[in-house]
Image: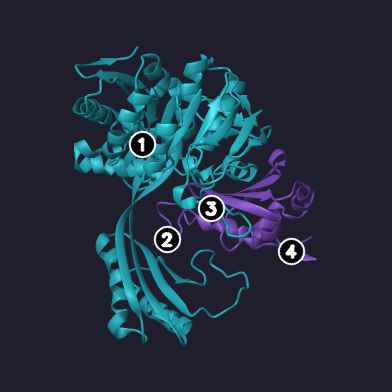
Amino acid sequence: MKRKLHELAHARAGDKGDTLTLALICYRREDYPLLREQVTAAAVKRHLGHLVQGDVRRHEVPNLHALQFVCERALDTGVTTSLALDPHGKTLSYALLEMVIDA
Amino acid sequence: MRIGAGSGFQGDRLEPAVILASQGELDYLVLECLAERTIAAAQLRKLADPAAGFDPLLETRLRTLLPLAVRHGFRIVTNMGAADPLGAARKVISLGSELGLRIKVAALSGDDVLSQLEPAMRTIEARGAPLSEYGALVSANAYFGAEQMLPALANGADVVITGRVADPSLFVAPMAHAFHWKLDDWERLGRGTAIGHLLECAGQVTGGYFAEPGLKDVPNLAQLGFPWCDVDADGNGVLGKVAGTGGAITLRTVKEQLLYEVTDPGGYITPDVVADFTTVSLRETGPDRVAISGAGGRPRTATYKVSVGYRAGFVGEGEISYAGAKAVERARLAGEIVRERLREDVPDLRIDLIGIDSAHRTDFGHAHAPYEVRLRVAARTASRALAERVGAEVEALWINGPAGGGGVRRYAQERIGVVSLLLERSRVRPQVTLLQEDRETQAA
């Protein structure tokens, strides 16, 4: 069955220069293995490839039932020089939650 | 000891801090008001007016909070010194005199390292380009840690005012002072850093920036309460807030904040320590109470991170709305007209349709025709005049563009870019100045 991440997890975006961080946190701890298997760094790079010019790294944070994605060159040069309406990329947590996985 | 967070950014609300200060039974109130962008802006203000280098809201915030600090016996720690901590401290002394309060203030300065920079120094941004590739430098501020603030606390300052300090360190300093932590006690510094990181954005851990109706409901966000943490001598703590305030402290709000802006959860670098959040344990101990323990720590790095501001040209923007039949088509046509008219002079142009693709640059297949849409054109330019032209071209669509465009807004601003580099600690000289009504001295 195809499911949106929005049904399974909540997310928070953060910025450091031109780097976007996306925390993906399971609502239920039992979904963590599924997300860990399906929401790989490569899958997130595919999903957000039109925004993220650089690499996507993934950190596993099992104590929080969370995955932390670090996306390089994702903020059009960074908050103070970006042309984006949302230069921090704060809305991008919900872009990640649009991703569809097999669940 | 109890530390409260009374501000999470430069323009944050004052009244939750007043509630926390009045009813929170605090030992310390920390006001975090300085972002990367904010300090560069402060340096520019100072260039134009030497008396304008500190936070413009300093007087407003402290006029209210200072009497509460004296009455309830808590100390204030803040980075509102921005580009001029000493000037800010003098302002607070004179404010104290005016209010009839005898207070001691300490200023931590020395974070301004602009004179130390050399064009060949490499930035730590993805490409590692040297500073010489960026525009004219306007600011360079080293991130100080708890260690550099400790003399201020040891000398009994009621108010500690800093410039650039790593946000979590603003909270770690009072902990290290109160519990006499050694500065190589990496475990405790790591735990304190986790707590500082949770508190530094104030309302973002009490349910702010979290709510989604239906799935993630948060009560009474209009009266969002700000957090405190009761910290023990080992650096573990319990988060809480004043009863009756809005918001919520739950495992979910705390998890989101713990990972906020963290590029490596196993190695979160501050001037004090390299903290490890992957061993953190969280537990709800009551309504709006979450206990945090178990963060780890490793030896700190040999360098300070330095945030460098440079002149990055200008950005011009214009917006105009279309509604009703063929709104999207009319907005697209308008965008094409502006692009064509600016093609020669302003090639670095971005066109958004607000309501369709401005935030995520795609609608991920949610194809639908909105009733109304707003065209936004933005461009980087070398001069203010060209930046003004971007908005002018959008404004001209009123008369010369597609039918039914309205609600034009236009902006043109100079931009200060920010890059970072690392500087040996020995090259930076922190300085603590102690101020009372009648004298100023340097702390050893």
Amino acid type of the residue tagged 2 in the rendering: Leu
Q: Position of residue B386 (x, y in %)?
A: 28, 65
Q: Please, which chain is the residue tagged with disc 4 on?
A: A
Distance between the alpha carbons at the discs numbered 3 and 1: 23 Å
> Mark 1: which amino acid?
Ala
Q: Residue furthest front?
A: B244
Q: Which residue is mark 1?
A: B140
Which of marks 2 and 4 precedes in the sequence? 4
Q: Residue B395, can we see it?
A: yes
Give the SS element for disc 3: loop
**From the viewer's perspective, is residue B299 above or below residue B413?**
above
The label shown at residue A3 is 4
In this rendered view, identify the residue nearer to me: B298 or B7. Answer: B7
Q: Position of residue A53 (x, y in %)?
A: 56, 57
Tell me which residue sits at (43%, 81%) in the image.
Answer: B323
User: Residue A73's mark?
Assistant: 3
Front residue of this view, candidates B340 and B411 = B411
Going by the numbered disc 3, the residue's amino acid type is: Arg
